[in-house]
Image (cartoon, grey):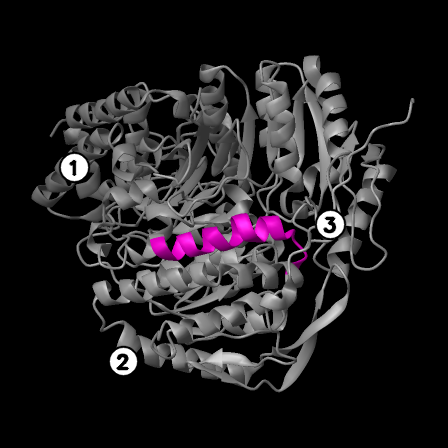
Amino acid sequence: MGEKLTFEYAPAPESRALVSIKPKYGHFIGGKFVAGSKHFPTINPATEEVLSQIALAGRNDIDAAVKAARKAYTTTWSKMSGKERGKYLFRIARIMQERSREFAVLETLDNGKPIRESRDVDVPLAAAHFFYHAGWADKLEYAGLGTTPKAHGVAGQIIPWNFPLLMLAWKVAPALAAGNTVVLKPAETTSLTALLFAEVCQQAELPAGVVNIVTGDGSTGALIVNHPGIDKIAFTGSTEVGKIIARAVAPTNKSVTLELGGKAANIIFEDAAIDESVEGIVNGIFFNQGHVCCAGSRLILQESIADEVLEKLKNRMAKIRVGDPMDKNTDLGAINSKEQLLKIRELTAVGDSEGAQRWSAPCDLPGKGFWFAPTIFTGVTQAHRIAREEIFGPVLSVLTFRTPQEGIDKANNTPFGLSAGIWSEKGSKVLWASQQLRAGVIWANTFNKFDPTSPFGGYKESGWGREGGRHGLSAYLKGVSHE
Amino acid sequence: MSNRIDVKKTYKLFINGAFPRSESGRTYEVESAKGVFIANPCLASRKDLKDAVVAARAAQHGWNKATAYNKGQILYRLAEMLEGRRGQFVDEIVTVTGVSKAKAEKEVTDSVDRLVWYAGWSDKISSLSGALNPVAGPYYNFTIPESMGVIAAIAPEAPSLLGLIDSIAPIIVGGNTVIVLASTKAPLSAMSFAEVIATSDVPAGVINILTGKKDEITPWMASHMDIDGLDISGLGAKKHSEIKSAGSENLKRIYSFKSADPGRILAFMENKTVWHPIGL
């Protein structure tokens, strides 16, 4: 008697037998895998196990990829009817669905995100992006850009490590639907699903050179950005790199879209449904280990409910299951890299030294790999670095407000403007707040929802342009009046 | 000809609904096409630009909040006021640029008509560009174009009035406020247009007009951290690269335009997507 009754979850690991990882990979250029010259290891961040050796593309590789993309554009892809282009995209969507479990396992091994998320979010959404854009390929003249919208030509695409396959889909699907060919570089730490996607392109019999995948680090990305044979740059990543790209393309005619950082406010008004809000806060900041540009990393709480919300939030956080990403019960997986873990540690240490109060959920972290417990900081002011800079980890900064206008002002007090959350049961207040917030995506009484039909992208220093929907498609077409 | 000494106008800046001189005290000479001295307009300084940005930022929230119907009526009112002062604008254009009276009349007519055209876009642009997005789940999801904030614009050297209208109207019809640099050689119609603005119920700070040197002011606009977008249609193509590079510090949206179309309005609007669950 008096003993605490607890229900333990039995381990429910997903099998990794579904995937075969080669010891070494090259690049995918002109429809074929070609050997790389230099290589670097890619590891499982949950175990630090080396999964494979990834090729580091240099100038010659980028030249070859751009050449293959140009050839495919001029000889094949730009001459093909939209109807036929679309059918290739439908094929790709279907093959991704067929091989979805394989993609999910590989993504989780290489990225560290929980299998539940790669299985239920990343991979199905990636396939959905191809399916959605496939249908646009033969309807471009109805996209509101005039009767003869034209592709740019060769698109250079650089994607981040937080949603490797999904970001690939966000980039490649609209580019191909609009009639461009692509040279895509996955992030240094997460190349494997992009290389598996190359196999999908082969299975779909996509004409050689329409999709080229080159792997590497930031130096490879710079070669793509500065390559004279590329007509359009699409980048998702940090605002810092986004500004470098904006400067680099200024003297050129390259068209650019940038999807950059954020420091999203998640505002909880006193008339919110508290339990649902707590779920929304957790989803907002702890989804994908907080490695989300649109993460709700600033909780902006109305003072009258702050104590109640924080108590419930801590209770809920204590129940977050941190650990083996391959376990189907895991909520919070591994931090993607040692470098990112150090950055999170550095910024949270600044949070301590600037006077905010840290609270971390009690949880056992695995001995190997990169881990960070779900953490909140209370007593945060707008001047604190943890309220201004993107931490890109499972760390929430909590600020409070008294009047709704003060809440909005605090939410908007940032150079970023990617997303924001609103929690209130009062419809008119929700719509008022959604008008006031200076951000490209507003989640009201929900958070971190994505869909191929729904334009996504930021105001201010969170980027240029949108991805998804008709607005996202237009980024891959000429026909707008301005340049 | 009478021997009456006519009363000449002092051409000043237009900032926050008032007509200040440049705080720098600097001016430059404008001559007629025949080389006769006409006026000493202000050579706007960096401080003048900063003052204009402060005014534009302060005015933006209120202007954006005005209903589309209201904004459309105010733009239409600009057309009404311009129409009523056609003669003055025709005379100024003829004097400064040396074009024929018929050509100047056409420019003024086109300017009035252009304002009327933009006025009508106010309550239509969001139905053109907005969307109800059929997401795969129980969510109501829509995308609407919203104002971007404070936009600066370089008006073309010529046509000095019609070019100015194209540098102002598409920006403000989208709910933004604007700081426009007028034609350097032919700034008179811009400064007279400020008088049209001042009598058209345009709230103070929504439109601010500077006169001066493009090479001096454009880089200040590009590097100003509280300007969200920049229309460089009036700037020589050779300078575009330098200005875009300077503007990258706050990822300013920088565009140039060749024609008047709805894309010109949408270029300085941001798309906002809103999600809300559907359920009992």
- Contact (Cβ within 8 Å) of mark 3 with mark 2: no
Q: In what element is the residue under mark 1?
A: helix
Viewer-proximal residue, A207 or B25?
A207
Residue located beneath label 2 in the image: A75
Question: Is residue A322 found left or right of B175 in the rendered image?
Answer: right
Q: In which chain is the residue bearing label 1?
A: B
Instruction: Give x and y (percent) for residue B235.
Output: 37, 54
Image disc number at residue A11: 3
- Disc 2 to disc 1, C-alpha distance: 50 Å
Q: Residue at x 47, y 43 (%)?
A: A450
Q: Is residue A15 left or right of residue B244?
A: right
- The C terminus of chain A sits in image quarter: bottom left
User: CB of mark 2 within 8 Å of CB of mark 1?
Assistant: no
The quadrant in which residue A296 appears is top right
Instruction: Give how far across and how far down residue B181 sits, in percent.
Output: 39, 42
Range shown magenta: A111-131
Question: Viewer-nearest of labels 3 and 2?
Answer: 3
Q: Chain of mark 2?
A: A
Q: Residue furthest front?
A: A1
x and y, in percent, of residue A365 in the image: 83, 49
Q: Amino acid at mark 3?
A: Pro
Q: Are marks 3 and 2 on the same chain?
A: yes
Determine if residue B172 is in view: yes
Q: Which residue is mark 1?
A: B108
Crowdedness near tag 3: few (<14), some (14–19) or many (≥20) residues, C-alpha within 10 Å: few
Q: Are marks 2 and 1 on the same chain?
A: no
